[in-house]
Image (cartoon, rainbow, N blue to C red):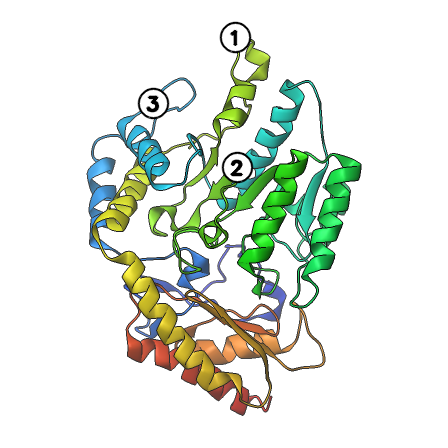
Amino acid sequence: MTRSPVWHPFTQHGLGEPVPLVARGEGAILWTEDGQRIIDGISSWWVTTHGHGHPLIVQAIAEQAGKLDQVIFAGWTHEPAETLARGLVDLMPDPLAHVFFSDSGSTSVEVALKMALGYWLHRGEPRHRIVVMEHSYHGDTIGAMSIGARGVFNRAYAPLLFDVTEIPFPHEGAEQATLDRLEAICREEAPAALIVEPLILGAGGMLIYSPQVLAEMRAICARHGVLFIADEVMTGWGRTGTLLACEQADVVPDILCLSKGLTGGTIPLAVTMATPAIFDAHYSTDRSRALYHSSSYTANPIACAAANANLAIWREEPVLDRIADLAARQAHHLDATASLPGVARARRIGTITALDVEVRDTGYLSAVGPQMLAHFRKEGLLLRPLGNTVYVMPPYCIEEADLAALYAGIRKALRDLAI
C-alpha cells in the first residue's frame, strides 16, 4: 500500500505511528476497515453526544441534501437556519437573542472576539484588551491561538499572535488570587472582554474549577462593564451535567460560543450567540458598522438540518436522564481507578473524568502519552491522552460493558507500562 498523502492534525508523521482507517460507526462503537471494534471513549474529539449515526440526525441530513445543499448566507436565508436560530434562542437563556453562524469552535471564538471589539468601537470607547485564563485553549485560528496558552500548540506562530492579559487558573485553595487579579485588571486596564472555558479547561489538561468561581468572575466583569464570553464549545450540550456549564453558576454570558455537539457531532457547524446590546452596537444604516465575518459555508442548510434534529432530540428524548446516568457510572469507575499506583488528581465533572499519570516529564509532550495511545489502540479503545493526562468523555449512549472496558484498559496500561 502506498503512503497516504493525508497530513493529519496534531500528528507527527515522522514517528511512523499507525493511522487506522475507520470504516463505520454506530452508537459508541467504531469499526476499522479490517473489522476491529473500537470503543469511542472521547466522543471522537468531544463532538459525538448521542452516538454515531443517530437515525434522526442521519434522516434529517439525507432529506435536506435532497432539497437544498448550499446557498450563500450573506443577504439570503433558508428555513433550516431560521428554524435553528429560533430553536436556539428558545433553548438558551435570556437575553441571548441573536445567532451568528460559523463553521467550527475556533471560528465561533473568532466571531466572539470580533463582536466584543466591534461593540466597544461602535460605542465610541474602543477597548482592545482581552483577558484570558491560564492554560486555556480556544482553537487553532490566529485569534483563538492568541487567547490560548502559549506553548507547543502555537510556538511557531508567535509573531502572528496579539497580546492578552492573563489571570491564573483558580486551583483549589488559590481561587481568591484569580479573582483578585481579575478585579485589578478590570479596574486598571478597562479590558474589552474576559473569555473562559466554563468549569473545565479541555486541551489545557481537563482542569476543573468551581461554579462559585465562575459566578464571581461574571460578577466582577458585570461590575466593571467588561464583556463576559463563555466558550462552551466543549462544555456545552450536557458534558458537565447540564445543558450549559454556565447553568451551574447561574450566569448568562454576554456572548456564547457553541459547536461540537450542536449537530450531535455529525457535521461541522458553530454559532456565536449574543445579547441585544451586542447586536444593537452593530445595527446601523452605516454599512461600515456591519460584523464583517463569514465563510463560504456559513449556515450550510445540511448542517443546520442536522442541528435541528439534535434540538429535537433534546426536546423529545430524556437526554439529561442519560447524562445523569452516565455521570454516575463514570464516578463509579473513576473511584475504582483513583487509588491505583501511578494515578494522581483523579477528577470528574458531569460525564467527563480525568486523571494524571505520575511521571517525571509531565505536560502535553510527556513520553507516556504516545505509549498509552499505542496501548489503547491495540486494546480497541479510542482514548487520546493529553500528555500524562488521561480522560474519558464518551457518547451518552455508551453501554456499561463498553464503559467498563475503557477503565479496564486504563488500568491495564498502568500495569503493562509499569507506571
Query: Which quarter of the rendering shows the N terminus?
Result: bottom left
Residue lying farthest to the top in this orientation: 285
What residue type is disc 2 on?
A: Ile
What crowding class fits label 3: few (fewer than 14 Cα within 10 Å), some (14-19), or many (20 or more)?
few
Q: Residues within 10 Å of mark 1 (few under 14, many from 20)?
A: few
Where residue 90 sits in the image (x, y, percent)? 33, 36
Q: Is residue 18 above or below residue 47?
A: below
Decide: is 46 above or below 359. above
Q: CA distance from mark 3 to mark 1?
A: 20 Å
Residue named by callout 2? 255
Q: Quadrant of residue 346?
A: bottom right
Q: Amino acid at mark 1?
A: Thr
Q: Which mark is residue 77?
A: 3
Q: Which residue is mark 1?
A: 285
Above or below — where is 33 with respect to 379?
Answer: above
Residue 370, position in %: x, y? Answer: 58, 74
State the SS at label 3: loop
Q: Is residue 234 left or right of residue 229?
A: left
Disc with the residue nearer the chain's start (2 vs 1) = 2
**Residue 57 appears anywhere in the view:** no
Residue located at (26% from left, 30% from top) = 68
Decide if residue 143 is on the left or right side of residue 98: right
Q: Position of residue 125 (x, y in %)?
A: 71, 22
Q: Nearer the viewer, mark 2 or mark 1?
A: 2
Look at the numbered discs 3 and 2 and tell me whether their residues touch, using CB distance below 8 Å.
Answer: no
- Mark 3 vs mark 2: give the one in front: 2
Q: Decide: marks 3, 1 in contact (CB < 8 A)?
A: no
> Which three-letter amino acid code belongs to the residue tagged 3?
Thr
Camera-side residue of 78 and 284: 284
Determine which of the numbered discs, if any, sits on residue 392 in the image: none
